[in-house]
């Protein structure tokens, strides 16, 4: 869903006739069909560009206590991370991209913990990288083709589109028109798997759902609007508690090229003790919230 290309959008709308009131007495009312939208994959083109902005806000207040503690251990923190970068396709075959350039703007985070504010810039902030699928693995270099540190490579990898294989999320969209009210079951499964792959074994994603609620006709083409929900659970190694975040929001996708335009999700952070911690006499009280927003837009590239 990171690529932008052109194709013909097929949108079918069936509305009840305006003259329905003129029907003879007893005649059944005309059936109103749900609007539909046709998503379609297209071939990637060298020079295609997409600008992506990502922002995540999270806050957490937690009191942890045990019978042998003089006073509870309190944690009060908030984290705001943001990034902006442009992805340019440098090599592709069919709908599979094998090489891209990533030009990053500001990338970093602001953390406030126990009243102390810290600002940290990412090592990839304001830098440009090349990423290529080569010999069954992704190779990341700087703009001149020089190898980069593992720290930088790991950070760049978090922002990469899929290389050397079809995009899992894009491929999950149905080949047939999708009607308002229908769910994207394949997409939900692919999104959950991608989050787990990116975040590691400490993270579980369940109850993922994406349901089409609206079809809009805009100057750039037909746009499908989806209600999205998922529950993210995470437990850090050796931590006595589990964080569960039920997220809800919306996603808008341009049918032309299956381009993600915007994804917003938010929800409360729920904290629960592990069974082992409860057996050891721990008690916990906590609350928090998480909000994320991802936007994408196509950009004109010099050819």
Image (spheres, rainbow, N blue to C red):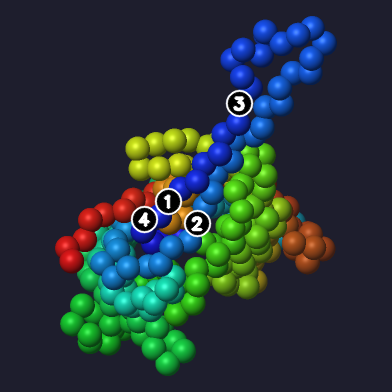
The tag on residue 248 is none
Q: Residue at coordinates 24% horizontally, 79% vertically from top-left?
A: 142
Q: Earlier in the sequence, mark 3 or mark 2?
A: 3
* Label 1 packing within 10 angstroms: few (<14), some (14-19), many (20+): some
Q: Earlier in the sequence, mark 2 or mark 4?
A: 4
Q: Which residue is mark 3?
A: 15
In this view of the protein, can residue 226 be seen by the observer?
Answer: yes
In the depicted structure, whether residue 254 falls above or below residue 275: above
Q: Which residue is mark 2?
A: 40
Alpha-carbon distance for marks 3 and 2?
24 Å
* Label 4 packing within 10 angstroms: few (<14), some (14-19), many (20+): some
Q: Which residue is mark 1?
A: 8
| Closer to us: 153 or 31 | 31
| Closer to us: 86 or 278 | 86
In this view of the protein, can residue 268 be seen by the observer?
Answer: no
Q: Which residue is mark 4?
A: 6
The image quarter in which residue 287 lies: top right
Alpha-carbon distance for marks 2 and 4?
10 Å
The image quarter in which residue 233 lies: bottom right
Alpha-carbon distance for marks 4 and 3?
28 Å
Taking the image as shown, residue 95 lies to the left or right of residue 146, namely: right
Q: Earlier in the sequence, mark 3 or mark 1?
A: 1
Where residue 238 sits in the image (x, y, percent)?
65, 71
Alpha-carbon distance for marks 3 and 1?
22 Å
| Closer to us: 109 or 87 | 87
Q: Residue at coordinates 65% horizontally, 60% vertically from top-left?
A: 186
């Amino acid at each position: 869903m990171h690529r932008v290309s052109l194709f013909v959008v097929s949108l079918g709308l069936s509305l009840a006739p305006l003259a329905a009131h003129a029907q003879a007495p007893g005649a059944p009312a005309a059936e109103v069909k749900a609007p539909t939208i046709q998503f379609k994959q297209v071939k990637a083109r060298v020079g295609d560009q997409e600008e992506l902005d990502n922002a995540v806000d999270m806050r957490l207040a937690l009191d942890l206590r045990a019978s042998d503690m003089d006073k509870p251990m309190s944690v009060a923190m908030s984290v705001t991370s943001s990034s902006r970068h442009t992805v340019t396709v440098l090599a592709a075959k069919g709908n599979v991209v094998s090489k891209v350039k990533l030009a990053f703007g500001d990338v970093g985070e602001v953390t406030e913990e126990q009243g102390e504010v810290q600002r940290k810039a990412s090592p990839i902030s304001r830098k440009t990288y090349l990423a290529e699928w080569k010999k069954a693995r992704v190779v990341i270099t700087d703009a001149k083709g020089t190898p980069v540190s593992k720290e930088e490579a790991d950070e760049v990898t978090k922002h990469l589109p899929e290389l050397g294989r079809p995009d899992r999320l894009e491929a999950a969209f149905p080949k047939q028109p999708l009607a308002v009210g229908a769910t994207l079951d394949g997409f939900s499964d692919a999104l959950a798997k991608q989050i787990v792959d990116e975040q590691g074994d400490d993270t579980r994603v369940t109850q993922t759902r994406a349901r089409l609620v609206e079809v809009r006709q805009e100057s750039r083409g037909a746009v499908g609007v989806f209600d999205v929900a998922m529950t993210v659970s995470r437990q850090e190694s050796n931590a006595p508690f589990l964080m569960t975040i039920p997220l809800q929001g919306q996603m808008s996708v341009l049918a032309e090229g299956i381009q993600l335009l915007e994804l917003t999700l938010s929800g409360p952070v729920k904290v629960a003790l592990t069974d082992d911690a409860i057996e050891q006499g721990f008690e916990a009280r906590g609350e928090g919230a998480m909000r994320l927003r991802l936007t994408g837009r196509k950009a004109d590239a010099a050819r």
